[in-house]
């Protein structure tokens, strides 16, 4: 891959970390995995909606090489306090163990556990050092890490992971039948494995949005995922689009894992409501099945007073789905102004109906909402803390930065030295290069 200035800086950092921690990476490779920016439907994955997003240029870099042993040795420059993570393949702490709950090592441990459980008998370990610049909430740092480590372990163990991220524009990648096996049927199994690490080992109730968007992201393209047939479609933006930028507004806050956040509560509420509706005779399997106006109003009339919070969650999902198709149509013709307006509407729904946002996230949104050239803004990701995002005309980016610098530290002084505005490009989700 062609190295950017950020890549070169990260490589220097990786080399330094390797030397300081006695990890040998010379002659190895660097795998770079992206962050993601969801355009819709945020929190839709575990509710069964279609999804659309892009890969963005905040990354995790892993420099690694096979070490000829049955051990994995890793060091993260982002979590130096955890020291070197080292384990023997097939011998890691138990799932959801208190011993690993507060260390980033729970991710490589979890990957080993899930791969063993699913029949991948790894024999070759690796040495690696990691460094990343993805904000700690809202841009899928954990999904990027899991995808990176799984693909790297597969590579050094000669397990073919498919043509990840290499499908041509407008092509579709459908999942074949069959469970996980030592020879993957499709790259979508990597998504399933990465999700299982978080769900079953760590205890984080994430869906498949983040892993899908990171794994399949393609430079200059939007990635559309249809859960009904598990297909991927690459959608170029229409030729008439204005020059715009994605701006990620990092609040400087530290977000706990999804298992400790409001995210887990919201997912549980949505699943509870599906069960309630099924007992009442509504033939649905997830909230995304409520697409018809008549069905929606029947449910709201019957349960609006007895289950107001559940109905608020449905209200967001129902209207977000309706907006989703309008947003996709607008993207295809290059109507970025409409994409931005829908992005803003989704943000209000996440704030008011889904109630998943947080005060710092909304402060960022408030700071940029009235800046001329800001097309739309909302919170990103799991909620509570982390980052917000905005779609901005290119000529308005500097005005957005100035507005954030003026308003955010004054409103949130505890984070005056931690916040940042990242101007992002649409990039490939996975790249690999020799050291």
Image (cartoon, rainbow, N blue to C red):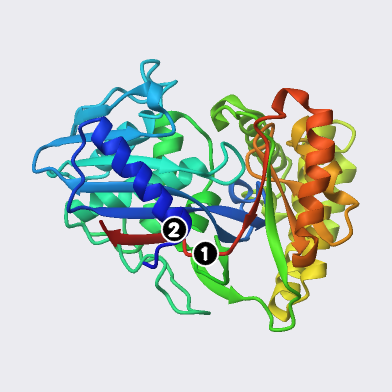
Image quadrant occupied by the C terminus: bottom left
Give the percent coordinates (x, y) of residue 87. 21, 28
Mark 2 lies on a secondary structure that is helix
Left or right: residue 259 versus residue 175 is right
- On screen, residue 321 above or below 88: below
- On screen, residue 107 above or below 397: above
Mark 2 closeness class: few <14, some 14–19, many ≥20 residues within 10 Å: many
- On screen, residue 393 above or below 131: below
Left or right: residue 30 versus residue 172 is left
Mark 1 and mark 2: Cα distance apart in space:
11 Å
Using the image as rendered, state which of residue 396 and residue 280 is in the foreground: 396
The tag on residue 215 is: 2
Residue occupied by mark 1: 427
User: Closer to the N terminus: mark 1 or mark 2?
Assistant: 2
Q: Looking at the image, is mark 1 or mark 2 nearer the viewer?
A: 1
Mark 1 lies on a secondary structure that is loop
Whether residue 71 is visible here, answered yes or no, is yes
As drawn, the residue found furthest toward the bottom would be: 239
Give the percent coordinates (x, y) of residue 203. 47, 29
Residue at the (67%, 32%) spot, across then down? 385
Q: Locate residue 376: give its quadrant.
A: bottom right
Mark 1 closeness class: few <14, some 14–19, many ≥20 residues within 10 Å: many
């Amino acid at each position: 891959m062609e190295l950017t200035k950020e890549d070169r800086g990260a490589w220097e950092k990786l080399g330094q970390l390797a030397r300081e921690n006695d990890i040998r990476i010379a002659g190895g490779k660097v795998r770079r995995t992206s962050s993601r920016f969801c355009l819709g439907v945020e929190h839709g994955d575990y509710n069964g909606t279609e999804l659309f997003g892009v890969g963005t240029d905040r990354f995790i870099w892993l420099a690694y090489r096979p070490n000829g042993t049955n051990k994995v040795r890793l060091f993260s420059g982002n979590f130096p306090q955890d020291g070197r993570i080292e384990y023997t393949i097939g011998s890691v702490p138990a799932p959801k163990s208190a011993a690993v709950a507060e260390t980033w090592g729970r991710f490589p441990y979890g990957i080993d556990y899930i791969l063993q459980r699913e029949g991948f008998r790894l024999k070759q370990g690796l040495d690696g050092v990691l460094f990343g610049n993805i904000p700690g909430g809202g841009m899928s740092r954990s999904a990027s890490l899991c995808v990176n480590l799984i693909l790297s372990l597969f590579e050094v163990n000669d397990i073919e992971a498919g043509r990840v991220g290499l499908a041509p524009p407008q092509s579709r990648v459908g999942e074949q039948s069959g469970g996980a096996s030592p020879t993957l049927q499709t790259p979508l199994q990597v998504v399933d494995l990465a999700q299982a690490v978080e769900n079953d080992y760590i205890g984080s109730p994430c869906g498949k949005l983040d892993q899908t968007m990171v794994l399949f992201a393609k430079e200059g393209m939007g990635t559309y995922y249809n859960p009904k047939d598990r297909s991927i479609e690459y959608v170029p933006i229409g030729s008439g689009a204005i020059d715009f930028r994605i701006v990620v507004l990092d609040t400087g806050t530290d977000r706990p894992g999804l298992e400790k956040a409001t995210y887990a509560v919201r997912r549980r509420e949505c699943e509870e409501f599906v069960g309630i509706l099924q007992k009442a005779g509504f033939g649905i399997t997830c909230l995304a099945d409520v697409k018809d106006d008549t069905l929606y109003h029947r449910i709201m009339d019957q349960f609006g007073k007895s289950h107001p919070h559940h109905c608020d969650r449905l209200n967001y999902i129902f209207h977000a789905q309706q907006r989703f198709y309008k947003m996709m149509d607008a993207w295809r013709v290059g109507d970025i102004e409409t994409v931005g307006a829908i992005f803003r509407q989704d943000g209000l729904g996440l704030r008011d109906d889904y109630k998943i946002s947080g005060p710092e996230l909304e402060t960022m949104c408030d700071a940029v909402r009235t800046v001329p050239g800001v097309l739309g803004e909302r919170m990103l990701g799991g909620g509570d803390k982390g980052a917000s995002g905005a779609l901005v005309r290119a000529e308005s980016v500097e005005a957005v930065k100035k507005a954030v610098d003026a308003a955010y530290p004054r409103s949130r002084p505890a984070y005056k030295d931690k916040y940042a505005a990242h101007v992002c490009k649409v990039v490939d989700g996975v790249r690999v290069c020799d050291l």
